[in-house]
Amino acid sequence: MIEVRNLKDLRLKLGLKQVDVANTFQLSKTYLSLIENGKKKCPDDLYKELMEYYNTMNQTEGLEAIFDYVRIRIPSHDVKRVVEDVLLMDFESFYEKPTGLFGYRLMYEYDNIRVLLSKKGDDRGILIELSGQGCRNYEYILNELDQQWLDFFGRCLFVDGVMKRIDIAIDDYIEYFSLDTVAKKIRTELFDTNFKKYRVVGSGNVVDGVSEGTTIYFGTRNSLVYFCFYQKNHEIANREKIPIEEVEVKNRYEVRLHDEKAHKFIEHYMEDTFLLRSARSVISQQICFFEKTRTGDLKKWSKWERFLGATKYVDLSMKVVKPSFYRKLNWLAYTCLQTIKVVQLGGEQEGFDYLGKLLNDVELNEKNKKVLEWHLAENMEVLSDNGRLIAKETGEIIC
């Protein structure tokens, strides 16, 4: 018996829109909706095709996404507090030295994890920088704390941190497609891209009998969005002087985001929570490769589609967006509920309202008052008077 409920559950899990799936299979949205809701029988062949499509879209086999570089500015000059409350590390483990990096004055470093301090009065505050190895080392610390990158970025956003650069690397262990084929598609214009500049570096150079491989750049190093696809196995084989067949990883696809684009990406990642999908979504919005059908028409390259899997729209636009009450609620639900529950239960057993005491001692800053005002204004009239928010109907002082 066909479980039509599986179709809707799978589609929603993958974040696919009903209209997009209907268009892919040349169905009407109404027809697909009737099938998903059990009001119309789904033909066996269509069910099989839909399940195969969803399984393909859920493809993650042989792919690993990692943060490969992180640079975040924190509006503070309290280095000790940033190290202990944001990085959750022991400040005494860091050693201090003078620096001129990025125009900062002092550097505090531990195991490729850097915290840079500007002079007092400089609004650049503190800069956290994690190199590729720094990311791996901090990942180890997060694992020891039973935490994830989501927790770290949540703390950064909570203290109004600003993402300055985020690099994500996707390692491909089964070679979803050949980069030489990608290079050929670029030369024959079987692709579409938002990038104005792109460059292919061929595999002509040979070092000790091993080709340096193909590298493809999209954008420039000064671009806010920049991609670099290259044959990682060739790089490792050359560096370690081993046969290329012994290298597990085949290709690496690097995504580099700067300034507003980096910040918008992390905001998206905080909601999506799946780094591989978030990174592939950015790639899918910038590049598409095609193949020709037997009739000469163009369609999306099947190997490219399989690599991308199910993607979501990532808004990297520069438009100003009001801070969201629900984004703060989602962050609270994801990062703090376990701690809140521990404090609540402990207080109940001891007869003391720890949470109430903490909340009564907190005074909202102007930014968060605005978030609250905008949220409440959707359902009630709110007055603002000398920094206070007042419910117009009851006269109650909200904060």
Image (cartoon, rainbow, N blue to C red):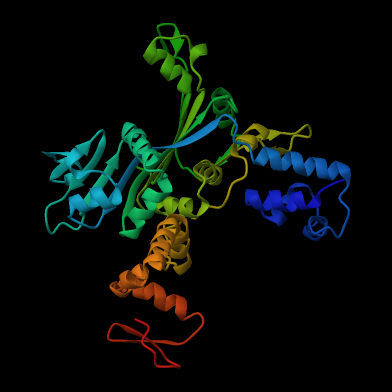
Classify residue 72 as left or right of residue 150: left
Percent coordinates x, y for residue 49 in the rendering:
79, 41
> Which residue sits at x=20%, y=54%?
125
Asked if residue 219 shows in the view, the reply is no
Percent coordinates x, y for residue 100 in the rendering:
14, 41
Camera-side residue of 397 and 281: 397
Quarter of the image with the N terminus in it: top right
- Residue farthest to the top? 209
Classify residue 273 as left or right of residue 36: left
Q: Is residue 223 placed above or below 85 in the rendered structure?
A: above
Quarter of the image with the C terminus in it: bottom left
Q: Is residue 365 placed above or below 170 in the rendered structure?
A: below
Percent coordinates x, y for residue 238 in the rendering:
40, 13
Q: Quadrant of residue 205?
A: top left
Camera-side residue of 302 and 35: 35
Classify residue 103 as left or right of residue 147: left
Asked if residue 211 shows in the view, the reply is yes
Classify residue 113 as left or right of residue 278: left
Q: How many marks?
A: 0
Percent coordinates x, y for residue 242 in the rendering:
43, 9
Q: Is residue 186 placed above or below 101 in the rendered structure?
A: above
Camera-side residue of 210 and 292: 210
> Which residue sits at x=42%, y=91%?
392
Q: Quadrant of residue 343?
A: bottom left
